[in-house]
Amino acid sequence: MKILVVDDDLHIQRLYKEEFEEEGYEVVTASNGKDAIELFDSEAPDIVTLDILLPDVDGIRLLRQMKEKRPKVPIIMSTAYDYRDDFAVWASEAYIVKSSDLDELKSTIKKLLGRQ
């Protein structure tokens, strides 16, 4: 199973990559929308964690582009800010507020991939 981690914070990328690889996932990372959409097309991830605030594009716009290309791929919106009231994020399968405790994110990924 392959996870695409899209986040402009390199510390978050490293943390997620290490943690998810320990769980047995293959991990690819992108720090901007342009790289993310290219990796989404070329790597065909099974699931995506997507930051809302990216340097070159709004994560919600990227969510729409990914869903248009491959609507069945689960996308988890991940941000330090609470956007739950923004109806646009409802197109994602899950919404996680970033935390150093990755238990919620890990269990959400397992649930969405059917790996309970």
Image (spheres, rainbow, N blue to C red):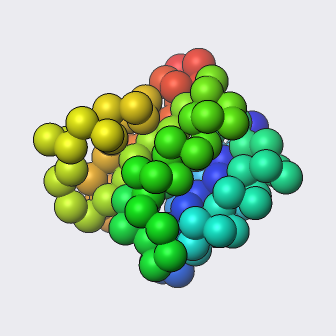
* Residue 2 appears anywhere in the view: no
**Residue drawn at point x = 21 percent, y = 61 percent:** 81
**Nearer the observer, 58 or 39:** 58
* Residue 75 appears anywhere in the view: yes
**Residue drawn at point x = 48 percent, y = 68 percent:** 57
- Taking the view exactly as shown, the residue that stands out farthest to the right is 42
Q: Is residue 1 left or right of residue 49?
A: right
Residue 2 pos. (x, y %)? 73, 44
Q: Is residue 53 left or right of residue 17?
A: left
Residue 116 pos. (x, y %)? 53, 20
Residue 26, placed above or below residue 92: below
Q: Is residue 17 left or right of residue 26?
A: left
Quarter occupied by residue 29: bottom right
**Residue drawn at point x = 65 percent, y = 68 percent:** 34
Residue 36, placed above or below residue 32: above
**Nearer the observer, 91 or 50:** 91
Residue 15, placed above or below residue 70: below
Residue 26 pos. (x, y %)? 75, 51
Quarter occupied by residue 6: bottom right
Residue 15 pos. (x, y %)? 51, 69
Which part of the image, by quadrant, shows the N terminus?
Answer: top right
Q: Is residue 15 left or right of residue 87?
A: right
Q: How many marks?
A: 0
**Residue drawn at point x = 73 percent, y = 43 percent:** 45
